Image (tube, rainbow, N blue to C red):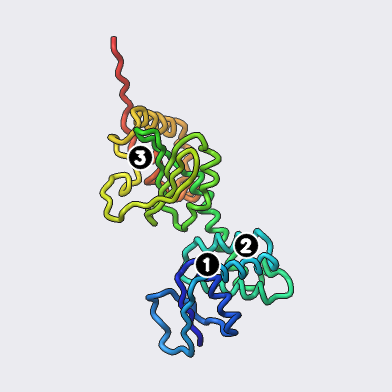
Amino acid sequence: MNVYIYDKTFDGLLTAVFDAYFRKTFPDFLLSEGDALPLFYDELHTVVTDEEKAARVWRGLQKKVSASALGCLTQSWLSELPNIGMLIFRYIRKAIDAPRSIETNFGDPDVLQLAQIWKKVDGERVHLMQFVRFQKAADGTFFAAFEPQYNALPLTIQHFKDRFADQKWIVYDMKRRYGFYYDLQEVTTISFDDDSKAAHLITGMLDESLMDENEKIFQKLWKTYFKAICIKERMNPRKHKQDMPVRYWKYLTEKQKVVPLQIKTDF
C-alpha cells in the first residue's frame, strides 16, 4: 500500500501524477500534511509541488481529452470534497493510459462520479450569478456576499467583470473568507483577518452608516416590489426552496424584514 502526501493544491496533484509515473508506483491514498496515516503502508512519498512537472502532465492531458473535460477536472476540484484529489488522480491516470478518450465512458464509476460533481459545482456557479444582490457603499463600491456550498466564486468573476464593467465591486465568500475586488481596470483577490469585527464581514450586509445615501431607499422599494408581485394563491414553498436554495436567503435583499418606506415631504 502506497501513500502520497501533497500540499492540497491542483499543481501539487498534477505533480503527484508526474511522480507516480516517474517512480512507477501509484498511490492507494493521496493525503495532505497532517492527515492521519493508514495503520499499515508499504511506502510513504512526499510530493514537492513543481510547476514544470504539473505543466508537463497538463500538456499530456490536453492530447488525451477535450477542453471541456479539462474544464470538468478543474471545476470539480473546486468542490473541495474530501476524496476529490484521489478521484481526479484516478481519472487522469485512466485518461493517460487509455488508447482513446474516456470522457464519455460513463460506465466507468470514476468518470461518472466526476461528471456528477462537475454538475453540482456548475449549478452552484449559476446560483451565484442568479442570486447576487449588490449593496452600494458610500464610496460608490458595490458589495455582495455569498456563502456557497462549493468554492465556485472564481467561476463567476468573468461574468461579473463583463456585466458590471463600469462599476467598482466586491464579491465575497463568507464561508472561505476571501473575495474579489474590481477597480474598473483589473480584478484582484482580497481577504480580511479572521478576527475582523466589521459588521458586513460577519452578516454579509452593509451597515447603514456605510451605505450610499440612496441605497436604503432602493432596498425598501425592491422589497416592496417583490412583495407586491407575489400572488399568494399561487405560492408553492417547496418549489420556491428548490429554485432558490434557503442557504442564499440571508444575503437576499427581498428576504430581509420589510420596513415601511417613509418619504419626507416639505411644504
Residue occupying the point 48% across, 46% down: 187
Q: Nearer the viewer, mark 3 or mark 1?
A: 1
User: At label 1, which amino acid type do we have?
Assistant: Asp
Which residue sits at x=71%, y=69%?
101
Judged by depth in the image, the label closer to the viewer, 3 or 2, is 2
Residue type indicated by callout 3: Gln
The span from disc 1 to disc 2 (Cα, nearest Å) is 14 Å
Q: Give the residue pinned by disc 1.
A: 11
Observer-nearest residue: 6 or 253?
6
Q: Residue at x 65, y 59 (%)?
A: 68
Q: Position of residue 124 (x, y in %)?
A: 51, 53
* Horizontal and vertical percent position of residue 172: 41, 48
Q: How many residues crowd mark 2 within 10 Å: few (<14), some (14–19), many (20+)?
A: some
Residue at 46% x, 35% y: name it: 230
Residue 209 is drawn in which quadrant?
A: top left
Query: Taking 262 as reference, is 223 left or right?
Result: right
Q: Where is residue 132 shown, x and y percent of the image?
A: 46, 43
- Say which residue label 3 marks: 256
Label number found at residue 70: 2
- Are the two marked residues, 1 and 2, in contact with CB atoms closer than 8 angstroms? no
Instruction: Looking at this view, name the residue that lies furthest to the right.
Output: 99
Please identify the quadrant where the C terminus is shown: top left
Q: Can residue 254 be seen by looking at this rendering?
A: no
Q: Amino acid at mark 2?
A: Leu
